[in-house]
Amino acid sequence: MQLNLRNPLVFFDLETTGINIVKDRIVEISFVKVHPNGKEESKTRRINPGMPIPPESTAIHGITDEDVKDCPTFKEIAKSLAAQIEGCDLAGFNSNRFDIPMLVEEFLRAGVDLDLNKRKFVDVQTIFHKMEQRTLSAAYKFYCNKTLENAHTAEADTYATYEILQAQLDRYPELQNDVNHLSQFSSFNNNVDFAGRMIYNEDGKEVINFGKYKGQLVDDVLKNDPGYYSWIMNGDFPLNTKKMFTEIKLRGFNSK
């Protein structure tokens, strides 16, 4: 089924040095940009992470230090990449929990504040797990009746994700061929920050989503525990999380 799009939809996948959003870095990004008229553009880029790639990560995606030693850093491609996805919605496999937070973190480290507040995010893994409870390779076999060759390469995973979403729309009539619907359906939480450290409650107010203050309003925590903000700012948290805490804190000052 051809996707019904208002904006271009970028399917993307990252290969990284690890799964720590704060400490790890991207070593490869691949994307397929699908336009509302069905036109497709694709690109794959290797990236020098500026740090050694652990053997256990190489064992998964096959990318070594030697493979990326002459590649550009993320900072060197950040502005051009941001321009390529400007005005696009984003889709991936487990992208809401990992790929999007990691990508945003890399943009912030590079000094490019990519505004994704008005974008829609479609997580094909979430749709899959709500419908069938399996993995990417199993999803590809189940929905497309194909064996996923070269799994854990960004390009193969990206195209597989794109094909799976099309097949999901064919299989499930209750899924609307609409990115707004797919974005809402593939979201577990209404995140304030991309890492999900804060979420919106039913009243649209920000609440803490981890630790001793889990479930409490961010405004209340910042007011009642003045040291909490400093702990967040000095802690091992994603830059995007710190940025959103700062915006809420500043909003509190401006409302006085």
Image: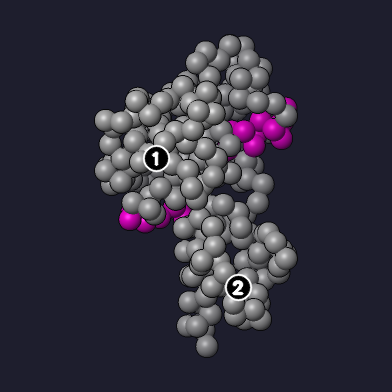
Q: How many marks?
A: 2
Which residue lies at the image location 47% right of the left edge and 36% below the top edge?
A: 17
Residue 34 percent location from the top left of the image: 41, 31
Magenta region includes residue 190 = no
Tell me: 234 left or right of 32: right
Relative to 255, residue 1 above or below: above
Question: Is residue 110 visible to the viewer in this orientation of the structure?
Answer: yes
- The amino acid at mark 2 is Tyr
Magenta region includes residue 124 = yes
Q: Residues within 10 Å of mark 2 (few under 14, many from 20)?
A: few
Residue 179 percent location from the top left of the image: 53, 40
Relative to 43, residue 7 above or below: below
Which residue lies at the image location 26% right of the left edge and 30% below the top edge?
A: 70
Which residue lies at the image location 44% right of the left edge and 33% below the top edge?
A: 53
**Label 2 or label 1, whichever comes before in sequence order:** 1
Element marked by disc 1: loop
The quadrant holding residue 73 is top left
Question: Is residue 166 visible to the viewer in this orientation of the structure?
Answer: no
Frontmost residue, 170 versus 71: 71
Frontmost residue, 182 versus 240: 240
Relative to 109, residue 17 above or below: above
Residue 123 percent location from the top left of the image: 57, 38
Q: Which mark is residue 228?
A: 2
Q: Which mark is residue 102?
A: none
Q: CA distance from mark 2 to mark 1?
A: 31 Å
Which residue lies at the image location 30% right of the left edge and 46% below the top edge?
A: 75
The quadrant holding residue 147 is top right
Frontmost residue, 107 versus 63: 63
- The amino acid at mark 1 is Met
Q: Which residues are magenta?
A: 111-132
The residue to which callout 1 is attached is 51
